[in-house]
Amino acid sequence: MPLVTSEAMLKDAQKRGYAVGAFNCENMEMVKAIIGAAEELNAPVMLQTTPSTIKYGSLETYAAIVAAEAKKASVPVCLHLDHGSSFELAMQAIKAGYTSVMIDGSKEEFEGNVAVSKKVADVARAVGIPCEAELGKVGGKEDDLVAEADTNTDPAEAKEFVERTGVTSLAVAIGTAHGFYVGTPVLDKERLSEVRAVVDIPLVLHGASGLSDDEVRDCVARGICKVNFATELRKAYTDAGKALIEEKPETFDPKALGKVGMAAVKELVKNRMKVCGCDGKADGIEA
């Protein structure tokens, strides 16, 4: 089917108590693996690209690849701009065919974040595209965004932020980190529950790579409707290629590397979809 927006799938996730898996893709092989996993599990799915991935390949290239693969799929597929770094990039993504965007103004002070998030949300709403924003700072590194320490989302600020900006989903900071964790993550899940109590739009969990299955499930039970996975997919893809080269050092065909990478990513995505509870949920979503 054609690409769809994230609106219906996230509302369904919120209504039925599961989370949509959102997976960062770097190339055609990862796109095929992610959508293939969604088809096998009859799950709605979001594919994402960050600014650095876009710089590597271009908005138009990823939009064309994902749209072509989504057209052949029987499940809802959404293409999302992850950690959009500016109003201009978000607008370019919409123009290129992305069906969901994120504006990440979390590096700004509260008022600056409100201003840029509202600006993107207003335009996105006018053309029927959902807009995600982030409040608080998720630790670790995502592209050029580095947070030395976590600043968890304040529930009262979250309520005000959503009311003033009109964003359709909100990424919250509760102690997760981008990249792999150095130690054992300590999540402020009570804070998540407090935000859920005062914010009625779908909530998003960033930095899920490396979290235990139980941690993810608990966050979903407390109101998370979208879970982002990036670093562990990259590692699975790369490790599969390394293993092939080690076993068969004479390998030179990129397709051979792509095949083992796809298989590894597909299995990981299927596992994560089951943890999020989105497997078997595609039929209940109106495109």
Image (cartoon, rainbow, N blue to C red):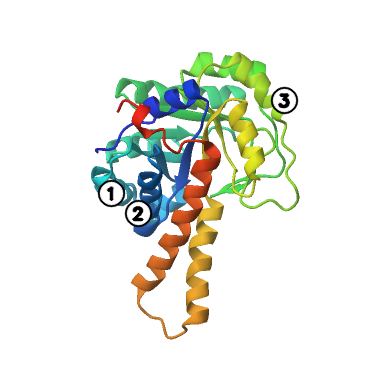
The residue pinned by badge 1 equals 69
CA separation in Å, label 1 and label 2: 7 Å
Q: Contact, CB < 8 Å: mark 3 with mark 2?
A: no
Identify the residue at image location x=45%, y=34%: 102
Which image quadrant for residue 176?
top right
The x and y percentages for residue 1 are: 24, 38
Residue named by callout 2: 32
The quarter of the image holding the C terminus is top left
**SS for dot 2:** helix
Question: Which of 77 and 150 lies nearest the eye of the viewer?
Answer: 77
Marker disc for residue 190: 3
Q: Earlier in the sequence, mark 1 or mark 2?
A: 2
User: x and y percent of residue 151 in the render?
Assistant: 70, 33
* Disc 1 and disc 2 in contact, CB within 8 angstroms: yes
User: Residue 50: image x %, image y %?
Assistant: 46, 46
> Who is closer to the viewer here, 104 or 108?
104
Task: Identify the amino acid type marked 2.
Answer: Lys
Q: Is residue 87 visible?
A: no
**Left of 110 or right of it: where is 4?**
left
